[in-house]
Image (spheres, rainbow, N blue to C red):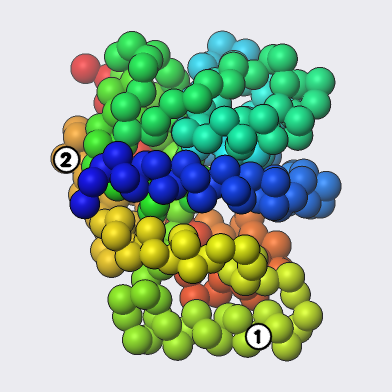
Amino acid sequence: MSRQTILSENKSYWTGRAASYSEVNQLELATQQRQKWSDCLHTQITRQFPAPTPESLRVLEVGTGPGFFAILLREKGYDVTAIDLTPAMLEEAKKNAGELAGKICWMEMNAEALSFADESFDVVVSRNLTWNLPHPGKAYAEWARVLKPGGLLLNFDANWYAYLFDDEAQAAYNRDRANSAEQGVWDQNVGENFDVMEDIARRVPLSNIRRPEWDLAQLQGLGLRAEADEQIWQCVWSEEEKLNFSSTPLFLVRATRTVS
C-alpha cells in the first residue's frame, strides 16, 4: 500500500465531504451533544490535571475536521491547537468557531508526521481519525512524542469498517441501517460517495483489526500507561447515534506519559 496514495485519497474524499460533515458538527453544537462532549472532555482532562487552570494547558487536537472538539475546548479556556490534513475542513472549522476562530491555532498537518517539537503539549485529543490512517502506529508514536511528561492522550474511535471483513459485523451493520430507516432517523452511513470511503477502508490496516486491544498494545509499547473505556458511547452519543451505530460502539483509549 502506498502511504502517499492513501493520504491523497483521504484528502480528496474529506475535501468533498467537508460541507456535509460540517453539518454534523453544527448539529452537535446546536443540541445537548455540545454539553455532553464538553463535560466529557473537561472531566477527562481535569482527572489528569486537577490543579492547573485550563489556560495553562496546551491541547492539540489531531484531525479536527469541522472543529467540534477544538471549539468546545477553547470555550473551556484551554490553549488549543487544531490540525487537519484537509484545508477545506479547516475552513469549515473556522466558520463553525465564529468569534473563537481567532483564539484557536489552526494548522494543515499530517497526523502521522507532526511538525511540533518533542514534549510540546499537555494533552492530545482525537475523534474518529485513527481508523482511516495508513500507518496508525506512526501516528501514535508522533502523538506520544509531542506529549509532555505527565501528559494525557484521549482517542475516541470505533471499529467502523469491520463489516467489510466479518459476516456477523456485516449483519449487525445491516440491522443498523434497517432500524434507522424504520425509525425515520437520519442515517449518517447513507449518502454521498460512501463507496469511495469503503474502498479506502478496505486498504487501511485498522478496518480488519480488533480494537481497542490493538491501540492499548501500541501505546504500552511506546511506554505510555493506557486503558480503554468501551462504554463511553453511553455518555456522549445521542439516541439517534446509538440507533445508527449500535454495531460499532465508540470507545475511548486513554493514555498517560509517565514522569521520569
In this picture, is 44 found above or below 14? above
Closer to us: 102 or 18 = 18
Badge 2 or badge 1: first in the primary sequence: 1
Does the image show residue 141? yes
| Residue plotted at (39% across, 42% down) | 8
Tell me the residue that label 1 is attached to: 179
| Residue plotted at (62% across, 13% down) | 55
| Residue plotted at (28% across, 66% down) | 208
Q: Position of residue 30 (x, y in %)?
A: 83, 47
Q: Residues within 10 Å of mark 2 (few under 14, many from 20)?
A: few
Residue found farthest to the left? 221
Closer to us: 181 or 196 = 196
Q: Are marks 2 and 1 in contact (CB under 8 Å)?
A: no
Q: Residues within 10 Å of mark 1 (few under 14, many from 20)?
A: some
Q: Position of residue 212 (x, y in %)?
A: 33, 57
Question: In the rendered structure, which amino acid carries the disc numbered 2?
Answer: Gly
Does the image show residue 25? no
Question: In the rendered structure, which amino acid carries the disc numbered 1?
Answer: Asn
Q: Position of residue 28 (x, y in %)?
A: 74, 49
In this picture, is 118 found above or below 144? above
Which label is found at residue 221? Answer: 2
Mark in the foreground, 2 or 1: 1
